[in-house]
Amino acid sequence: MLSRVCQVALCLVALSCAASALAQAQAYPSRPVRMVVSGVAGSSNFAARLIAQGLTGSLGQQVIVDGREGGALVNEFVAKAPPDGYTLLLNGSAMWLLPFMRNNVPYDPVRDFAPITLAISTPNMLVVHPSVPVKSVRELIALAKARPGELNCATGNAGTSNQLAAELFKVTAHVDIMRIPYKGGGPAINDLIGGQVQLMFASASSVDQHVKSHRLRALAVTSAKPTPLVPGLPTVAESGVPGYVSVAIFGVMAPAKTPTAITDKLNAEIVRALNQREMRERFFASGSEVVASSAQEFDAAIKEEMSKLGKLIKDAGIRDE
């Protein structure tokens, strides 16, 4: 008899919790929502502002973009925010890969966050200076193997998508290419155009015009499939490096323990906004493609990158101190 009473009591508690969560989600949001992003400019900030604009109307509350400097400190700030749906984070691979490159990172990318949606992906283009005597990835690999350590590749700071793309290429293509680090993509591209460096994995939007003007030669794109961002350009994988894929991904997260009813609502509204034609076109013009995934797909993508690229980072000794 007591067991039966306990079962009824537990059911009533569960129903009460479910009703409370539903009521909370229906009332959400009752005040402005803050979307925190690392940096006051750049691709992450641009993405956050586009998404915030699309959300403001549908949520009935203003979504404010809060650009902050600090990288790890930005992520920590969101991780420690109240899990009520009023503080969100838009960030990319650097957020969940930083623990592999730095000791004592003040957050756990899996334990401390609730994925909402993988919003966009941005592939790189493999480009070379016209003086490099190759017109395909296969020819580049053959040249690199014939001249080990002589070719050099411009990359950004530790852990940037173009550096990881280059390191992954070296490992999967089994070539020895020297890395030349730069503090930003602009100076790297300028030196590539000037012939000081020979190749680079760069975002399509940053080098497209230079390719069209023949100041650079495009060999391939780093996505899993050919992309309309660079029509007619083959993938690295189909050009002699099977299995090669390297794209920068960006998504929206909330602090861990944010009610599922709220994260589900945010996913639905963000996905709806991302799939608007104007939104897709604006991201496309900036060199990115809309993904608009489920929370579960985003979670899986994060864990896959941590497994694959975490090992790459450790094996290559990449550090961000």
Image (tube, rainbow, N blue to C red):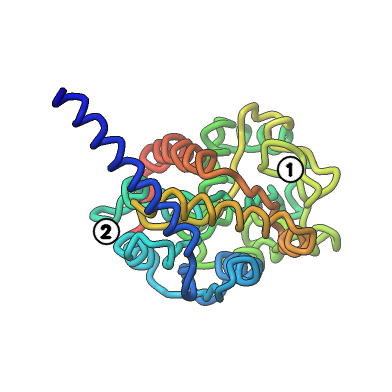
Identify the element where label 2 is drawn.
loop
Q: Residue at x 26, y 32 (%)?
A: 8
CA–CA distance in space, label 1 to label 2? 37 Å
Q: Who is closer to the viewer here, 190 or 275?
A: 275
Disc 1 marks a residue whose amino acid type is: Ala
| Of the pair 221 and 12, the residue shown nearer to us | 12
Q: Quadrant of the C terminus?
A: bottom left
Q: Nearer the viewer, residue 257 or 121?
A: 257
What kind of residue is marked 2?
Pro
Residue 263 position within the rendered picture, expressed as x and y whole percent measured from the top left: 48, 53
Q: Is residue 289 left or right of residue 16?
A: right
Give the mark nearest the N terminus, 1 or 2: 2
> Is 249 situated left or right of 218 in this image?
left
Is residue 56 something that shows in the picture? yes
Task: Check the image and report above or below for 68 versus 261.
Answer: below
Question: Which residue is the site of mark 1?
Answer: 220
**Numbered badge on residue 228:** none
Say which residue appears at 70% left-offset and 29% top-offset: 240
Which of the labelled discs sits on residue 106, or is there none? 2
**Residue 120 % position (x, y):** 63, 53
